[in-house]
Amino acid sequence: MGLATAYLSLIVLLPLAALVWKSQKAGRSGFWQAVSDPQAVSALKLTLGISVVVCLVNAVMGTVIAWILVRDRFFGQGLVNAIIDLPFALPTIVAGLTLLALYGRNGPVGVNVAFSRTAVLLALLFVTLPFVIRTVQPVLLELDREMEEAAASLGASPLATFRHIVFPNLFPAILSGVALAFARAIGEFGSVVLISGNLPFKTEVASVFIFGRIESGDAAGAAAVSVVILLISFAVLLAIGALRRWTTRHDRA
Amino acid sequence: MPKWALRLAGLSYLGVLLAAPVGLVFWRTFEHGVGPAWDSVTTPAAKHAFVVTVLIAAIAVPANTIFGVVCAIAIVRRRFIGKGIVNALVDLPLALSPVVVGLAFLLLYGRQGWFGSWFTDHGIQVVFALPGMVLVTIFVSLPFVVREVVPVLREIGTEQEQAASTLGASPFQTFARVTLPAIRWAVAYGVVLTTARALGEFGAVSVISGHIVGKTETMTLHVEERFQSFDYVGAYAASVVLALLAIATLLAMNLFRPNEATR
């Protein structure tokens, strides 16, 4: 369809083409120089490292929360279920501000994590909270409980039942939730910018580094690191697509 | 692990990460009564930021809704070359850093950009002005309607549409009388998500807007600007306005959410 393709080209493709073009304008050596700048490398490393931690925490806590929402019954469950999506709806800058209000310098609990890597982690955990929960929850709802009951009646411990029956069924969903969280964490900006203090080599993530380069007028350097982020995002999207095809094939079999 | 331990772990995680911080901002805003909070969200700068935000959403949301429906129909019902690429491009805004989006538009429409000089020559300012902010907002909120409508279109199939056209309905009539009623809840859900994203966008508009107070400042930029000027009540109060909008979004989401049970 012409209209859709034209709109997509104009809104998505053309700006990204300009970005890639700018990053390559200084030649391959210029691109490598910009990407291998120590501050850029440090920002990229921090971003990737913290994103991996974010994925691990989400894999565990997301599954636990999905579990208590589906299999448990407690007072206020409906409300808890409703607020899970709040990080999707809340603007990221507000997310950062709320965390800073509680865990910043003048916070009421006496915990101060502002301008530390813990703060970056906290902000990323906040914005990625819904992904694993919302991918695992529907699978858990559909999961046939007879299998678990059969395992239990054959003498399997709850842990063994979880490991051999429940977990293999949830695994693809956990993985796609984690991939979505990873993609989000790699590019996050708004929630991190206030609470991290943006200290180069310490708490500066890739998006903040790019922002700094734009502000200081180094568009080529900003474009080079942006292309790296763009490639990572694209790879994650392809992985999610492959994962989806793999799981739907699993369903049909 | 016993049930209560899981419940305790999950709920404390949510409490520490989500409920307590958001709750505290509400409390901090109204700590000294409603008066100061109200005063700080009704300053000229705050009011202007609100108008700019609503204006951007009022352009971006209808544009993406029309595109979303057309694009979803193209993806599900048509065969064309490059469909895989279209599919991937639609998802890209979900995964791409907003700062990178802002930079891409800056490089395209900025002073030295490909289109920059043409627009400058014709007296249209895109960068550091409303057009640029609208464009980046369209970019970041593009996938939602498409992604909600595609599965529904797949599920309803083409039989009813074929029946309508066999009975002599024009393509437009078929769309308006058969397809649109079938996808309307998915469209509504997509519109809610698009609106939330458009109202809350920060990184991309931060890059492209130039932060001109009283001119190109949106609500989210206003929150940051107030905070950086040490006006915490102003920042918290503007945040509460945005948080209330987010809560309204949640309510609308629960209203329109595709019902898993009936699938």
Image (cartoon, coloured by chain):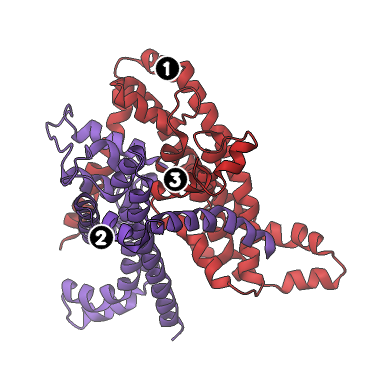
Q: Chain of mark 3?
A: B
Badge number at residue B38: 1
**x, y percent for residue B12:** 21, 46
The C terminus of chain A lies in which quarter of the figure? bottom left
Chain colored purple: A
Residues behind callouts 3 and 1 on a single chain: yes
Q: Which residue is mark 3?
A: B102
Regarding residue B252, the answer to whether it shows in the image is no
Residues behind callouts 1 and 2 on a single chain: no
Question: Pointer 3 and pointer 1: residues touching (CB < 8 Å)?
Answer: no
Chain colored red: B
**Extreme residue toward the left, this view:** A110
Compare marks 3 and 1 and give the one earlier in the sequence. Answer: 1
**Closest to the observer: A37 or B174?**
A37
Q: Residue at x 62, y 74 (%)?
A: B81
Q: Which residue is mark 2?
A: A55
Regarding residue B167, the answer to whether it shows in the image is yes
Residue B206: name its quadrant: top left
Q: Amino acid at mark 1?
A: Trp
**x, y percent for residue A162:** 22, 73
Q: Residue at x 32, y 54 (%)?
A: A225
Q: Amino acid at mark 2?
A: Cys
Q: Chain of mark 2?
A: A
Q: Amino acid at mark 3?
A: Gly
Is A238 situated left or right of B136 in this image? left
Q: CA distance from mark 2 to mark 3?
A: 26 Å
SS for dot 1: helix
Question: Pointer 1 and pointer 2: residues touching (CB < 8 Å)?
Answer: no
Q: CA distance from mark 1 to mark 2?
A: 40 Å
From this view, report whether residue A114 is shown above or below residue B212. Answer: below
Front: mark 1 or 2:
2
Front: mark 3 or 1:
3
